[in-house]
Image (cartoon, rainbow, N blue to C red):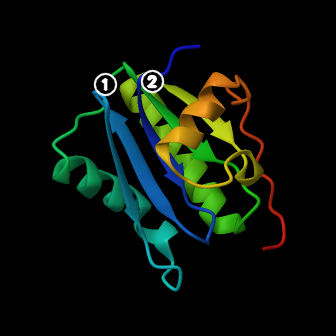
Amino acid sequence: MTIKNFLVINFTGKNDCLAIKFNDNFFIEKFQDKVNNSDNLLENILNFLKKKDIKIDKNFSVLVNQGPGSYTSLRVSIAVAKGIQLAKEIKIFGFRNDQISVFNLENIELLIKSKSLENKLIKPFYGLN
């Protein structure tokens, strides 16, 4: 599996952030923990893409954190990722918190290379934080 350009949605209710890898550039945008970030997730993604002047096309993939985490945050994240998948005809993959020890490009690329991303069915895990 080759994933070159991707958007990562990491909204579990704790340490929420978005990341984009595009043409060998990597950007992360972090969000405050005390705010219900899932309410504005789609708007945050659109603003992040606009700020970096990036357009998602069919060569992109979306990686979405499946938890454990907040029920609402995970459901909204997955719904937004599925919406992007349908609108842009891209691939979507799920990962779990325990698969990335530190949220950075190196660990995300190791996760991709490990072939442990799920792409058949996203099964969120709503655990205790």
Write down the residue under mark 1: 57
For label 2, count other residues whose C-alpha is less than 10 Å away and answer few (under 14), some (14-19) or many (20+): some
Q: As drawn, which residue projects farthest toward the top?
A: 1
For label 1, count other residues whose C-alpha is less than 10 Å away and answer few (under 14), some (14-19) or many (20+): some
Residue 87 in the image, given as x and y percentages of width and height: 39, 31
Residue 116 in the image, given as x and y percentages of width and height: 74, 28
96 displayed left or right of 60: right
Q: Nearer the viewer, residue 111 or 128?
A: 111
Q: Nearer the viewer, residue 96 or 40?
A: 96
Residue kind at label 1, given as amino acid type: Asp
Q: Nearer the viewer, residue 114 or 68?
A: 114
Q: As drawn, which residue projects farthest toward the bottom?
A: 34
Seen at 55% across and 32% down, the residue is 109
Secondary structure under badge 1? loop
Precedes in sequence: disc 2 or disc 1: 1
Please give the count of numbered marks on the rendered protein: 2
Seen at 83% across and 72% down, the residue is 128
Seen at 65% across and 34% down, the residue is 111
The C terminus, quarter of image: bottom right
Q: Is residue 98 above or below residue 59?
A: below
Residue kind at label 2, given as amino acid type: Ile
Q: Is residue 44 above or below residue 55?
A: below
The N terminus, quarter of image: top right
Residue 38 in the image, given as x and y percentages of width and height: 51, 67
83 displayed left or right of 78: left
Seen at 58% across and 44% down, the residue is 64
**Residue 107 image-quadrant placement:** top right
Asked whether disc 2 touches disc 1, contact meaning CB atoms under 8 Å apart, the reply is yes
Secondary structure under badge 2? loop
Q: Is residue 6 above or below residue 13?
A: above
Write down the residue under mark 2: 90
123 displayed left or right of 23: right
